[in-house]
Image (tube, helix red, strand yellow):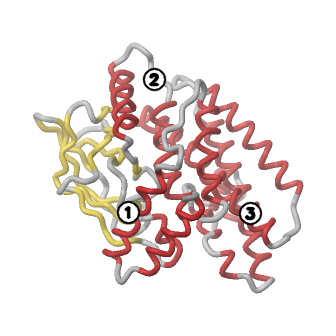
Amino acid sequence: MHTMELVAEIASRVSDAADERAARHAYRRSFSQLRSQLSMYPDGSRPSEVFEHAAQTVRSLGATCLPLAIAVAMHLYPFCVLQCVPIPLLSVASLKRALLLRTIRNRQLILANTGSERSNGTTTPLIATRSADGVRIDGRCEYLSLSSVADIVLFKAQIANSNDAVLCAADLRASTVRIGQWKFSGEMELSDTSAVTFVGHRVPKGHYLIVPDDAGLGCVSDYQRSWFHLFIAEVYLARVEHLRSTWDLPEREAGRSEVARLRQQSLQLLDDFRTDGDVAPLTRMTAALKLRVSMLAQTTAAALRSRGLAAEAGGLGYIKSQPTADRKILRGFGVLSFAS
């Protein structure tokens, strides 16, 4: 079956389900078929090459099904980060990464990630407690995409009674992990997004890495966020271009040229990045790219609504808060009038 036919089938099965339990079952069954046709484990000699391979997958999905493309991006971007983050070759961390990547590829595992900004809701910070056989995790994160189908969840937690933090790759299907109800309704159900709570969850040795200072953790987090910006921009841009072509909306050449420039510069900075360098230029460039695509998405949504096509504009507004809110980016750029 063609990929787009499978996408339509997932949407139909989920919407026709009697309740959320049945919808999740339909989602898991259909997603299993879909993933066999997608490139879920991109490779390359440079970070930009890895990204370009992964971007082909999310572009093809994003054009016709925005929430499903977002969900798949939530697997691809942490996989790319894991593969590309610069680590000294002859180090324990490098060995752990190689073993984890080999396991993911060989077993064709699906990743999920809780590293995005937390909401203002009932989030309980993730706390890691040292134990003889590893660390124990307790806490809650509000947003986890691919919650029904992912095998491994990546997250960071603060070590109890310590300034250190820990980066974990944990089993999402353990009984000590509790997945909440879907966060979104309608078409956005296809992002498979839920809250996740860890209750005395064991992460064994070899499945986590202790980061001994806030500066080191901040660098890794900013690097990860930069990849997230790149993927979100790619997904929404594909959707915007599809909608503009389908409904014959006027093109904005200046906007497209600016996006192309920011994208090229972001990928160059990605290739040049080193962990002993300054991550700020990469973070700012990818944030600017995400912000520019967000503006294109909002003008496209407004144009569709003006033609009585409000349903077609559905979902385009979510980019304003993914993964860094537009207002926060503008505030960081000193555009205070937009940050209230």
User: Looking at this rendering, what residue extends furthest in the bottom direction?
Assistant: 308
Task: Choose mark 1 or mark 2, whichever is in front.
Answer: 1
| Residue bearing mark 1 | 29
Secondary structure under tag 1 reads: helix
Question: Few, some or many C-alpha atoms within 10 Å of disc 1 (few <14, some 14-19, many ≥20)?
Answer: some
Q: Is residue 304 left or right of residue 189?
A: right
Q: In the rendered image, which residue does mark 3 sit on?
A: 242
Could you give the CA–CA distance between mark 2 and mark 3, rounded to whole angstroms? 38 Å
Q: Image point 59% across, 67% down: which residue?
A: 318
Give whichever of 62, 218 is nearer the camera: 62
User: In the figure, is residue 227 to the left or right of 36?
Assistant: right
Mark 3 packing: few (<14 Cα in 10 Å), some, or many (20+)? some
- Give the quadrant of the N terminus: bottom right
Q: Which quadrant of the figure has residue 130? A: top left
The residue labelled by disc 2 is: 87
Between disc 2 and disc 3, the foreground one is 3
- Describe the element under mark 3 as helix, strand or loop: helix
Q: Position of residue 7 (x, y in %)?
A: 54, 64
Q: Position of residue 72 (x, y in %)?
A: 50, 53
Earlier sequence position, callout 2 versus callout 3: 2
Among numbered discs 1 and 2, the one appearing first in the sequence: 1
Crowd tier of the residue under label 2, counting other residues whose Cα lies within 10 Å: few below 14, some 14–19, many 20 or above = some
Amino acid at circle 3? His
Q: Residue 159 appears at what percent x and percent y?
A: 25, 41
Disc on the earlier residue, 1 or 3: 1
Question: Which residue is pictured at 25% across the width and 49% down the height?
Answer: 127
Pick the front one: 200 or 127: 200
Instruction: Give whichever of 131, 293 is nearer the camera.
Output: 293
* Foreground of the two, 7 or 297: 7
Give the answer, above or below, for where 51 lies relative to 7: above
